[in-house]
């Protein structure tokens, strides 16, 4: 199904398991699966859709990395950047918004999984 266990982005097992716990216990999630170690395919109840969430741990998400993630992982819906202090640079925020990709950290992922327009 994928290459679970390795990723070139340096995301640790603990970071991945934290996001997995958030997704697994979210009230708007009916099911999910993980592929390529850092990719979560999340089935949402209220929206009747599947959102692809990419798990990273970036203190500041650069536009270059945002572009790479969107190119490498087709149909990216949300880029999760990690801890509550982590965030996106201004250029990456604009780029992702233009491509309807949300950027969330540990403090905003729950709300994003509930929103229909999670990129705003």
Image (cartoon, rainbow, N blue to C red):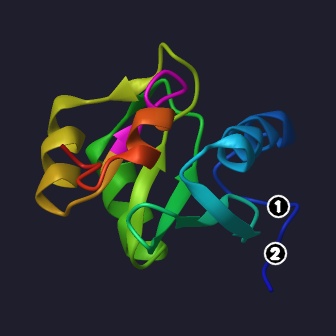
Residue located at (88% from left, 61% from top): 5
Magenta part of the chain: 103-108
Predominant SS of the magenta segment = loop
Q: Are marks 1 and 2 in contact (CB under 8 Å)?
A: yes
Residue located at (60% from left, 56% from top): 29
Residue located at (28% from left, 56% from top): 116
Pointer 2: what residue? 3
Pointer 1: what residue? 6
Q: How many numbered marks have been drawn onto this rendered protein structure?
A: 2
Magenta highlight on residue 105: yes
**Quadrant (top left/top right/bottom left/bottom right) for the N terminus:** bottom right
Where is residue 44 shown, x and y percent of the image?
51, 63
Dot 1 falls on a residue whose secondary structure is loop
Residue located at (50% from left, 35% from top): 110
Using the image as rendered, state which of residue 114 and residue 104 is in the foreground: 114
- Lateral position of residue 53 relative to residue 67, left or right: right
Q: Looking at the image, which residue sits at the far bottom?
A: 1
Relative to 73, does residue 90 appear above or below in the rendering? above
Circle number at residue 119:
none
- Lateral position of residue 103 relative to residue 37, left or right: left
């Amino acid at each position: 199904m994928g290459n679970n266990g390795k990723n070139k982005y340096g995301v640790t097992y603990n970071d991945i398991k934290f996001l997995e716990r958030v997704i697994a216990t979210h009230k708007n999630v009916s099911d999910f699966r993980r592929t390529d170690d850092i990719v979560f395919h999340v089935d949402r109840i209220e929206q009747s859709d599947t959102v692809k969430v990419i798990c990273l741990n970036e203190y500041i998400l650069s536009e270059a990395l945002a572009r790479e993630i969107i190119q490498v992982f087709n149909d990216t819906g949300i880029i999760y950047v990690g801890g509550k202090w982590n965030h996106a640079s201004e250029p990456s925020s604009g780029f992702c918004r233009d491509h309807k990709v949300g950027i969330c950290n540990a403090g905003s992922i729950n709300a994003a999984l509930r929103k229909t327009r999670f990129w705003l």
